[in-house]
Amino acid sequence: MTTLVQPPWYKQFWPWALMAGPITVIVAGFITLGLALHTPESLVVDDYYKQGKAIHLSLQRDRQAQALGLQALLQWQGDRVKVSVESQHNPNMPWPQQLELLLSHPVDAAQDQRLLLHKLDTLQTGTTAQAVYVGATVLPKDQLKYEFILQDLNGQWRVLSLERGALQRDVQLLPSRL
């Protein structure tokens, strides 16, 4: 009669197959813990009251942009950005010398960019006024879709992209819908 000699448990398939799931969960848990401890909480706000006041001011700027009939077209030209801003309700629009363009990263506030745009040209025809602004930028390496906000430096008005737009693509900027 022959006796079967079984190999030790650690040389068999089934104990390792059954342990693979719990071991994977434990490793994933440690990775998640490491990310939580070493990543800043940029989405958490300390002072909600200040945020509420800022939202109210943003709405006033949007209303002002609607009243002026503002819209803009953002065009990328290599490492430069060209912005054509148009006022449909004010043909005598006093265009500022500089505007600010914010490229807002969808997740990481540290990757946001603020660009200072300089006035290049103005044009007035009939009931519309138009100005062209240009500025230099360093394009981020990631290809995520950004939110674009164009505003005057005095904080009187702003126009923004109603949908997130990819870099290197023309983007239409409008006052937000209230």
Image (tube, grey):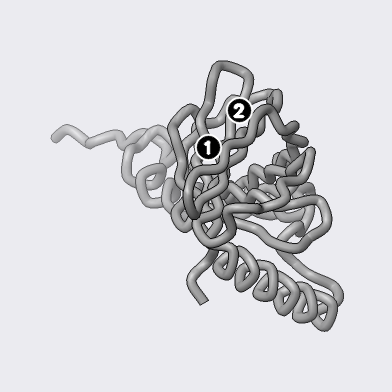
In percent of width and height, residue 146 lies at 55, 44
In percent of width and height, residue 30 lies at 66, 50
Residue at the front extreme? 126
Q: In the rendered view, does 74 fall on the left or right side of 114?
A: left
Residue at the left extreme? 1
Q: In the rendered view, does 65 fall on the left or right side of 117?
A: left
Q: Quadrant of residue 90?
A: bottom right
Q: Which mark is residue 50?
A: none
For badge 1, the amino acid type reads Leu
Disc 2 and disc 1: Cα gap in Å?
Answer: 7 Å
Tell me the crowding category of disc 1: few under 14, some 14 to 19, or many 20 or more residues within 10 angstroms, Cα based.
many
Identity of the residue drawn at 69% across and 23% down: 138
Residue 122 versus residue 158 in the image, above or below: above
Q: Is residue 137 visible?
A: yes
**Front-lying residue, 98 or 128:** 128
In percent of width and height, residue 173 lies at 51, 50
Identity of the residue drawn at 29% across and 34% down: 5
Identity of the residue drawn at 55% across and 30% down: 142
For badge 2, the amino acid type reads Val
Residue corresponding to mark 1: 74
Q: Dots 2 and 1: beta carbons under 8 Å?
A: yes
Q: Which mark is residue 81?
A: 2
In percent of width and height, residue 172 lies at 45, 46
- As helix, strand or loop, the secondary structure at mark 1 comes to strand
Mark 2 or mark 1: which comes first in sequence? 1
Name the quadrant of the N terminus: top left
- As helix, strand or loop, the secondary structure at mark 2 comes to strand
